[in-house]
């Protein structure tokens, strides 16, 4: 199905999506190195830089999905697969759309795998921190040493005042 006049092609945003995916992969690799080094300050900076890239990728995908819907395809990755396959069967389209889409899918898988590993590293850090907290709790007499307000909840061992 042709794209309606004034509508964009589903392939129009692919180069921008690819560039954003490259940036995200770079940031995820930086995040991984910082997790391994336990550099909390560096992690905060990378996380701050990741958010706008992810937002940009989401907006570009939404734009592509709208163009797919206008072209009569499902507004999804499966719809893009169908659109690329249709265009690859001799219908007019940018010659690089299929290659760019395939590369973008590969980059998405790469980012997903790096993110999975980063999640494992985060879980390892959390487990280590929980173990350290448990040791401190045992040494502090088994109770919570901070209350919900963040203040020390340690109870004094002195006698209470009896009035009578």
Image (cartoon, grey):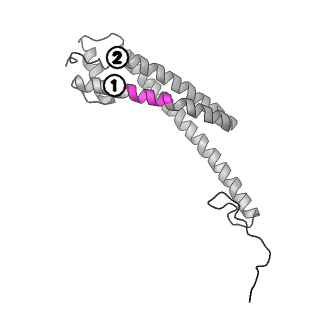
Residue drawn at the location 56% of the way across and 40% of the way down: 119
Residue drawn at the location 57% of the way across and 34% of the way down: 47
| Circle number at residue 149 | none
Where residue 163 sits: x, y (%)? 74, 86
* Neighbour tally class for label 1: few under 14, some 14-19, many 20 plus, Cα within 10 Å: some
Q: Gap in Å between the C-alphas at discs 1 and 2? A: 9 Å
Q: Is residue 20 left or right of residue 32?
A: left
Residue drawn at the location 66% of the way across and 57% of the way down: 150
Residue 6 sits in quarter: top left
Residue nearer the viewer, 69 or 131? 69
Q: Is residue 35 left or right of residue 64?
A: right
Q: Is residue 157 left or right of residue 133?
A: right
Residue 164 sits in quarter: bottom right
From the image, give the main secondary structure of the stretch colored magenta: helix
Q: Are marks 1 and 2 in contact (CB under 8 Å)?
A: yes
| Circle number at residue 12 | 2
Q: Is residue 25 left or right of residue 34?
A: left
**Residue named by callout 1:** 63
Relative to 128, does residue 84 appear above or below in the rendering? above
- Element at badge 1? helix
Where residue 41 sits: x, y (%)? 67, 36
Based on the picture, tell me whether residue 55 belongs to the magenta stretch: yes
Where residue 127 sits: x, y (%)? 63, 50
Based on the picture, tell me whether residue 105 belongs to the magenta stretch: no
Q: Earlier in the sequence, mark 1 or mark 2?
A: 2
* Neighbour tally class for label 2: few under 14, some 14-19, many 20 plus, Cα within 10 Å: some
| Quadrant containing the N terminus in the rendered view | top left
Report the residue that reaches farthest toward the right: 158
Over which residues does the magenta segment extend?
52-60
């Amino acid at each position: 199905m042709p794209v309606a006049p004034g509508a964009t092609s589903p392939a129009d945003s692919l180069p921008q999506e690819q560039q954003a995916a490259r940036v995200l992969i770079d940031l995820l690799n930086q995040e991984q190195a910082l997790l391994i080094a336990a550099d909390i300050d560096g992690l905060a900076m990378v996380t701050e830089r990741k958010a706008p890239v992810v937002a940009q990728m989401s907006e570009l995908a939404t734009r592509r999905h709208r163009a797919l819907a206008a072209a009569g395809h499902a507004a999804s990755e499966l719809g893009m697969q169908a659109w690329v396959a249709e265009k690859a069967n001799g219908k007019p389209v940018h010659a690089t759309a299929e290659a760019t889409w395939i590369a973008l899918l590969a980059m998405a898988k790469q980012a997903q795998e790096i993110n999975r590993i980063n999640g494992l590293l985060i879980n390892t850090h959390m487990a280590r921190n929980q173990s350290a907290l448990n040791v401190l709790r045992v040494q502090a007499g088994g109770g919570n040493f901070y209350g919900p307000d963040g203040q020390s909840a340690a109870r004094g061992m002195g006698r209470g005042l009896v009035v009578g």
